């Protein structure tokens, strides 16, 4: 078999299926193998007719290209097929249930897509004078107003472009507030169950991270927080509901202790989907929280679109929000405050986190979601998300091991790998077998406080029939593992276009260039 420069087989690939069947083309039925773009195309071909430039004199001086650029040429149908074939190897929320815990892979309503394609939103440019886009400004302000209403906070920074970016923004506001008080506090408390972005954010901003251990029931003990508080502590970063899918019931006691010590309460709001319309984070004592519009408010993510991570801030931090921000005039009209100088007098922004105003396309979609659901609809969505997770937990509890059986789940059902003990099957093997069943695996090995974690977030958009089919597949796999069929799991996935790839190596040492195979190079020379 010839290997391409990325170390994978060059087309045509002989696919070996479960039954050892091979095909000449490498295709398996309508699952069509696809080679790299460079292998499909030809370096000396082109898909468009461009007239010869003639006696064109370039004005690029020494920057003029010396050799051909080396891009493959394809006809239009070849190019079309290449990308459509690749897209069919992707898993997507539009294909099936996507239980990736903590990521809230819910349906992206098509109404949102219709709204964002309106020319007044789709065809504007961030460098246009604001006076020419009053509708867009009003939309950003209106979305901000909804976020404040839902969270009970004082102000909102709309510009951060993802959850992690929002964390950085919120923590930078905290850093600025501490500096304005003339204090130096350089410690941030982070519970062990936290998402990796929390300690990474704190470290990026120069804080020292001090972990807080989890209680046996998966929640944070206010006593453990109190023990670690002191004049050097700037903030705690707490997720609620936490990454074990549990509501931190001592959250108010923790907030009070943190405030009494002169520190701030950063809440990771990625799990807001479980509590929208039920709890306002502002009422729990939160000082800063990012909201993942791409999770809670249904905007496409995970290959389908960029994130958006507005940050809501309490009264104590409001003055430090980055520019640009929306200010409301006496007449209620919204205007962007674009520079720190414009802000002077009312605020002392810590700076700016993006070039423009944020993810406009996501703002339109998120507001369309809010307006189409209304307050009652959003509350109902949260309730259904929690119901779906508890349903999965209840129906799998006897064949898989629930990590924290005594606490009701919020929007996620968390299992550990005790049910696989002695079977020779690992959480990873189990996940690979799910792929053969047509499911994107759940989140694995996170949170770290649970051994071999399997974190399932069904979201509210699955029907009962869809949940039942998923549960039946999971039950069958769990029973098969317990029946001792480890070989079945070790061989999985057998139906996927690729088997087990070395994900760590792919991430750490990606091969991002293509070099033609030796024969081709020799022929060209
Ligand atoms: C998704 C997530 C984040 C990070 O959000 P991004 O938008 O992916 O940057 C942070 N914390 C938790 C708990 C999350 O689930």
Image: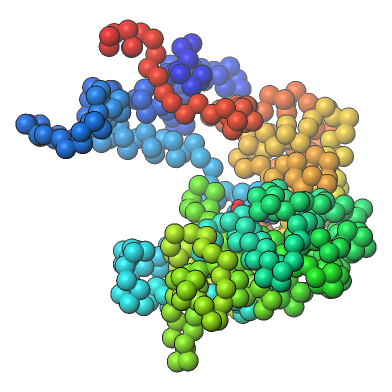
Please state the horizontal and vertical placement of residue 361, each as a whole percent of the image.
Answer: 43, 62
As drawn, the residue found furthest toward the bottom would be: 331
In the rendered structure, the answer to whether residue 158 lies left or right of residue 191 reads: left
The residue shown at (85%, 29%) is 423
Q: Please count the marks in the image.
A: 0
Please state the horizontal and vertical placement of residue 404, each as a whole percent of the image.
Answer: 87, 53
As drawn, the residue found furthest toward the left would be: 55
In the rendered structure, the answer to whether residue 81 lies left or right of residue 22 reads: left
In the image, residue 429 sits, relative to residue 147, either above or below, namely above
Please state the horizontal and vertical placement of residue 250, each as a whole percent of the image.
Answer: 86, 68
Which colour style is shown?
Answer: rainbow
Please name whichever residue, 485 or 432, is drawn nearer the observer in this view of the structure: 432
Quadrant location of the C terminus in the rendered image:
top left
In the rendered structure, the answer to whether residue 315 lies left or right of residue 360 reads: right
Q: Is residue 433 visible?
A: yes
The residue shown at (75%, 41%) is 445
In the rendered structure, the answer to whether residue 62 lies left or right of residue 423 reads: left
Please name whichever residue, 500 or 496, is drawn nearer the observer in this view of the structure: 500
In the image, residue 96 sits, relative to residue 37, either above or below, namely below
The residue shown at (63%, 79%) is 154
Looking at the image, in which quadrant does ligand 1 appear?
bottom right
In the image, residue 440 sits, relative to residue 266, either above or below, namely above
As drawn, the residue found furthest toward the front would be: 182
In the image, residue 83 sits, relative to residue 458, either above or below, namely above
Q: Is residue 295 visible?
A: no
Please name whichever residue, 133 or 264, is drawn nearer the observer in this view of the structure: 264
Please state the horizontal and vertical placement of residue 264, each as a whole percent of the image.
Answer: 75, 68
Please name whichever residue, 83 or 194, is drawn nearer the observer in this view of the structure: 194
The residue shown at (48%, 50%) is 304
């Amino acid at each position: 078999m010839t290997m391409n420069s990325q170390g994978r087989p060059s087309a045509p690939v002989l696919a070996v299926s479960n039954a050892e069947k091979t095909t000449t083309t490498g295709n398996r039925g309508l699952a069509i193998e696809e080679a790299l773009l460079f292998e499909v195309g030809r370096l000396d071909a082109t898909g468009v007719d461009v007239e010869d430039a003639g006696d064109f004199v370039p004005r690029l001086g020494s920057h003029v290209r010396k050799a051909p650029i080396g891009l493959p040429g394809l006809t239009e149908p070849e190019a079309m097929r290449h990308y459509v074939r690749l897209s069919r190897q992707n898993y997507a929320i539009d294909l099936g249930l996507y239980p990736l815990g903590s990521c809230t892979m819910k349906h992206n309503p098509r109404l949102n897509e219709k709204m964002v394609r309106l020319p007044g939103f789709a065809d504007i440019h961030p460098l246009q004078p604001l006076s020419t886009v009053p509708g867009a400004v009003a939309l950003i302000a209106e979305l901000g107003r909804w976020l404040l209403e839902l969270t009970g906070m004082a102000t909102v920074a709309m510009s951060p472009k993802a959850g992690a970016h929002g964390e950085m923004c919120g923590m930078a506001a905290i850093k600025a507030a501490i500096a304005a008080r003339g204090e130096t506090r350089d410690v941030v408390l982070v519970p062990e169950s936290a998402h990796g972005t929390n300690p990474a954010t704190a470290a990026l901003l120069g804080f020292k991270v001090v972990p807080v251990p989890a209680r046996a029931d998966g929640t944070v003990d206010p006593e453990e927080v109190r023990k670690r508080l002191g004049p050097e502590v700037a903030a705690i970063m707490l997720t609620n509901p936490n990454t074990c899918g549990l509501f931190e019931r001592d959250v108010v006691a923790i907030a009070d202790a943190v405030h009494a010590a002169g520190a701030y309460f950063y809440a990771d709001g990625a799990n807001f989907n479980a509590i929208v319309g039920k709890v306002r984070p502002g009422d729990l004592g939160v000082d800063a929280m990012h909201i993942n519009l791409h999770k809670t408010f249904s905007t496409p993510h995970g290959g389908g679109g960029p994130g958006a991570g507005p940050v809501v801030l309490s009264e104590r931090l409001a003055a430090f929000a980055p520019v640009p921000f929306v200010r409301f005039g006496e007449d209620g009209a919204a205007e962007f405050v674009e520079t720190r100088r414009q802000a002077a007098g009312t605020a002392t922004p810590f700076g700016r986190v993006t070039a423009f105003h944020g993810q406009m396309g996501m703002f339109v979609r998120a507001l369309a979601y809010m307006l189409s659901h209304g307050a009652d609809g959003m509350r109902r969505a949260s309730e259904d998300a929690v119901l779906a997770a508890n349903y999965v937990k209840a129906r799998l509890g006897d064949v898989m091991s629930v990590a924290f059986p005594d606490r009701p789940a919020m929007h996620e059902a968390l299992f550990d790998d005790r049910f696989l003990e002695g079977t020779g099957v690992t959480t990873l093997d189990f996940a690979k077998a799910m792929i053969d069943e047509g499911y994107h695996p759940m989140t694995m090995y996170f949170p770290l406080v649970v051994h071999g974690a399997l974190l399932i977030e069904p979201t509210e958009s699955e029907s009962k029939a869809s949940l039942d089919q998923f549960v039946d597949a999971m039950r069958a796999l769990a029973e098969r593992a317990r029946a001792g069929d480890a070989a079945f799991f070790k061989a999985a996935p057998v139906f996927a276009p690729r088997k087990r790839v070395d994900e760590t190596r792919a991430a750490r040492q990606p091969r991002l260039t293509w070099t033609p195979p030796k024969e081709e190079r020799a022929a060209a020379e």
